[in-house]
Amino acid sequence: MLVKHWMSKQVITIDANDSMNNAIHLLKKHNIKMLPVMKQGKLVGIVTDRDLKRSSASDATSLEIHELLYLISKIKVKDVMTKDPITVPLDYTIEETAEVLLKRKISGAPVIDNYGDIVGTITQNDIFRTIISLTGVERKGIQFGLEVEDRPGSIKDVSDTIREYGGRMASILTSYDLAPKGFRRLYIRMYGVDRFKLNKLKDSLREKASLLYMVDRREVKRETY
């Protein structure tokens, strides 16, 4: 899943010499938290709602409200922006992008093409949308958490068992995190199994793997093993 398919393509930018007051207005008007800062058509920085709040607070000590508004109108974006901003290439995967945001402790980043031109922005909210799509959570259904042997065919054994009971899978995700050596965690979201067959399905799954939990969102109930 590539960034170019999930980024926000409508890029709202601001000039480095524009006022902080106008930056605040743009963030509120477009309901966004980040503005790429441009100078002569080139990306030179980034300003976020956090930068603006921090700057307003630091300069607001003992000021009357009209003095504060005047001060904000005089501060330039270039004075509060983050220079040399972290960017994400257009062909990055969502996973790589999430790693960048997490490591850098930032909420979003401009997306650039092979020529260094900004073509979009990617934020935590965009990542969340991707996760929702990737996991199939909108279908509700049932999620099984299992621990399977780390060997060829172990995931197929589980998925074939679910299909035998008429189940259709919305997503299959695996991870080595939290699993002992020689095993992996398997998370399957599925739907379509007759409720009266569910207990038999769980018994059959236990023959193939360790059943860690089952979340049944059809009745908003959770069973943990």
Image: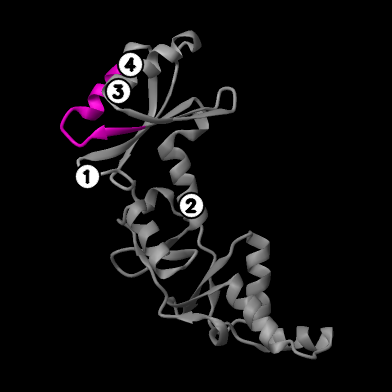
Residue assigned mark 2: 126
Q: Are marks 1 and 2 in contact (CB under 8 Å)?
A: no
Which three-letter amino acid code belongs to the residue tagged 1?
Lys
* First in residue order: circle 3 vs circle 2: 2
Residue corresponding to mark 3: 159
- Using the image as rendered, state which of residue 127 and residue 143 is in the foreground: 143
Judge left or right: residue 67 versus residue 38: right
Q: Earlier in the sequence, mark 1 or mark 3?
A: 3
Question: What residue is shown at x 42% (from left), y 37% (from top)?
Answer: 135
Q: Is label 3 in a helix, a strand or a loop?
A: helix
Q: Secondary structure at mark 4?
A: helix
Locate residue 162: give its quadrant: top left
Q: Is residue 175 visible?
A: yes
Q: State whether residue 111 appears in this view.
A: no
| CA–CA distance in space, label 4 to label 2 | 38 Å
- When asked about the image quadrant of residue 134, the answer is top left
Stretch of the chain drawn in magenta: 146-161
The local crowd at label 4, few if under 14, some if 14 to 19, many if 20 or more residues have their Cα within 10 Å, is: some
Distance CA(mark 1)–CA(mark 2): 34 Å
Placement of 20 over or under 115, stated as above or below:
below
The x and y percentages for residue 150 are 20, 37
Residue 197 locus on image (x, y percent): 44, 10
For label 4, the residue is: 204
- The residue beneath circle 1 is 181
Q: Nearer the viewer, mark 4 or mark 2?
A: 4
Q: CA distance from mark 3 to mark 2?
A: 30 Å
Residue 155 sits inside the magenta stretch: yes
Callout 1 secondary element: loop
Q: Is residue 223 above or below residue 14?
A: above
Which tag is nearer the camera, tag 1 or tag 3?
A: 1
* Residue 119, position as x, y percentages in the image: 41, 61
